[in-house]
Image (cartoon, rainbow, N blue to C red):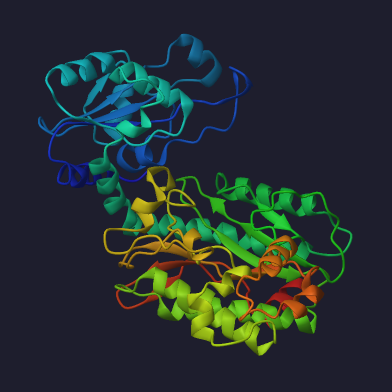
């Protein structure tokens, strides 16, 4: 964990944004696989990690705005626990590590919350996403579990988003460490992408690298020769010479900070001329986003300039699109080939703070989500600020079912050369993703850039 002053400062900063009441930050509990004692690998709630730093189950952090006290609620381990786990620190010792001097048994939380409600004080909670925490809040607040999420404090959500969006220097160091592991994962995939290997072999090796060097993959690994399926977690195919392999993978390090990168490579090590043409359009869009991303610029504008204009210009040059480029982008014609957004926030979560609500994280009162296919899936549209960490992940995909649907409904037929697309039905998809830190005047890639040009990818695959 970080130095305890980091957590003290974060809680003090939160106090300045919440006017009154009691703030509850729930930690997570163990999650059983198939019976109570056989659990999935524990993952602490990211908001609890941010403010209280303790990576252990069954804890609740409380920030009392009026009396200025931070408290920790949980239970000390007993002898039965120690037999299986070895000696464990007491709750008061754990609290001392993160600057919390007030510690109490978990059962005392019910009395605290009940008194606060009787006194007419606001109890601030974040939107819960785990059933056990929803049931805990039902008992604490006396609210039916179906209504608990609607009781979440918008003031607290906005305060947490404002704080977590700007990454501290200590967080950037952790993101760099995660990026180092992510680099190794993607280079390993390039060197293993040979005919006859299986997708499962590669996916398993990458997951093993993440575990060996940190904690675990930052999300279930996407690795597929059917890259046109945007989040393809099926790993059942044997790699075939000449097909494109899309690998979207990242590492979560021991402090739970994430990396998230995508590379696309030709099985066997050499791009065909057609693959090279499409690949270079996606690379141009990726590089353009790096050029444009800077403080004060709406990421919605970067999305339109890259996933829209660069991709449309490139596909028009290849004879796959037609007409006026700006008009095509305005009508969303490019979304046939990239039906997702350019990127999202990243940090303690690979989709940072998504549990708090995507519109609160990626949008604000000035810039709201666009109601248009493709652009409507953009997770981050608001103005960039120094300290933001986000992904830059343009792509081009040939999705036969989507092409056939648009063709039959004559959608954007003024801009799309449907007669030329039949030859691309077996192409697959290409996505190229880097992680960016917004700086004073622009942005930089977090970590060493994974091989990305055609020549770099082919050279890495030949080693």
Q: Is residue 48 left or right of residue 6?
A: right
Q: In which quarter of the image is the C terminus?
A: bottom right
Residue at 60% x, 74% y is 412
Q: Report the residue that reaches farthest toward the top.
A: 79
Q: In which quarter of the image is residue 175?
A: bottom left
Up the image or down, 236 lies above or below 241; here it is: above
Coordinates of residue 248 in the picture (x, y in percent): 63, 59
Q: In which quarter of the image is residue 427?
A: bottom right
Up the image or down, 50 lies above or below 416; here it is: above
Can residue 209 be seen here? yes
Q: In which quarter of the image is residue 366?
A: bottom left
Q: In this view, does 88 lie to the left or right of 182?
A: left
Can residue 462 be seen here? no
How many marks the image carries: the answer is 0
Q: Quadrant of the N terminus?
A: top left
Coordinates of residue 79 in the picture (x, y in percent): 46, 10
Depth check, front residue: 6 or 130: 130
Coordinates of residue 299 in the picture (x, y in percent): 40, 69
Residue at 46% x, 48% y is 349
Residue at 33% x, 68% y is 384
Coordinates of residue 397 in the picture (x, y in percent): 67, 68
Depth check, front residue: 28 or 118: 118
Depth check, front residue: 224 or 405: 405
Depth check, front residue: 276 or 375: 375
Q: Report the residue that reaches farthest toward the front.
A: 409
């Amino acid at each position: 964990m970080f130095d305890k002053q980091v957590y003290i400062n974060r809680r003090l900063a939160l106090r300045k944004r919440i006017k009154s009441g009691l703030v509850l930050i729930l930690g997570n509990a163990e999650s059983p696989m198939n019976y109570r004692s056989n659990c999935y690998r524990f993952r602490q709630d990211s908001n609890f990690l941010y403010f209280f730093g303790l990576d252990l189950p069954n804890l609740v952090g409380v920030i009392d705005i009026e009396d200025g006290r931070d408290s920790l609620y949980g239970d000390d381990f007993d002898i039965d626990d120690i037999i299986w786990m070895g000696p464990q620190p007491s709750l008061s010792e754990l609290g001392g590590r993160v600057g919390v001097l007030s510690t109490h048994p978990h059962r005392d939380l019910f009395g605290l919350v009940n008194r606060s409600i009787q006194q007419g004080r606001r109890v601030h909670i974040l939107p819960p996403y785990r059933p056990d925490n929803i049931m805990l809040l039902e008992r604490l607040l006396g609210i039916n579990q179906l209504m608990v999420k609607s009781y979440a404090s918008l003031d607290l959500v906005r305060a947490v988003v404002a704080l977590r969006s700007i990454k501290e220097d200590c967080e950037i160091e952790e993101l760099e460490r995660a990026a180092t592991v992510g680099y190794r994962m993607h280079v390993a995939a390039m060197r293993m992408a040979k005919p006859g290997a299986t997708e499962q072999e590669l996916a398993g090796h990458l997951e093993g690298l993440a575990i060996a060097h940190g904690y675990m993959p930052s999300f279930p690994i996407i690795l597929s020769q059917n890259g046109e399926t945007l989040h393809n977690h099926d790993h059942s195919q044997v790699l075939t010479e000449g097909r494109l392999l899309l690998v979207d993978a990242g590492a979560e390090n021991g402090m739970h900070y994430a990396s998230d990168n995508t590379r696309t490579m030709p099985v066997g090590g050499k791009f065909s001329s057609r693959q090279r043409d499409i690949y270079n359009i996606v690379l141009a869009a990726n590089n353009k986003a790096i050029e444009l991303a800077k403080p004060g610029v709406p990421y919605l504008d970067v999305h339109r300039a890259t996933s829209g204009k660069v991709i449309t210009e490139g596909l028009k040059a290849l004879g796959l699109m037609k007409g006026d480029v700006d008009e095509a982008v305005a009508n969303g014609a490019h979304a046939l080939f990239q039906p997702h957004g350019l990127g999202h926030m990243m940090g303690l979560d690979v989709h940072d703070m998504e549990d708090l609500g995507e519109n609160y994280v990626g949008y604000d009162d000035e810039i709201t989500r666009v109601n248009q296919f493709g652009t409507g899936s953009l997770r981050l549209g608001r103005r960039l600020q120094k300290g933001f960490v986000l992904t830059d992940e343009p792509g081009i995909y040939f999705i036969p079912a989507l092409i056939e649907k648009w063709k039959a409904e004559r959608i954007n037929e003024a801009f799309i050369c449907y007669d030329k697309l039949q030859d691309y039905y077996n192409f697959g998809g290409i996505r190229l993703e880097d992680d960016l830190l917004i700086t004073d005047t622009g942005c930089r890639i977090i970590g060493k850039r994974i091989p990305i040009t055609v020549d770099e990818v082919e050279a890495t695959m030949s080693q």
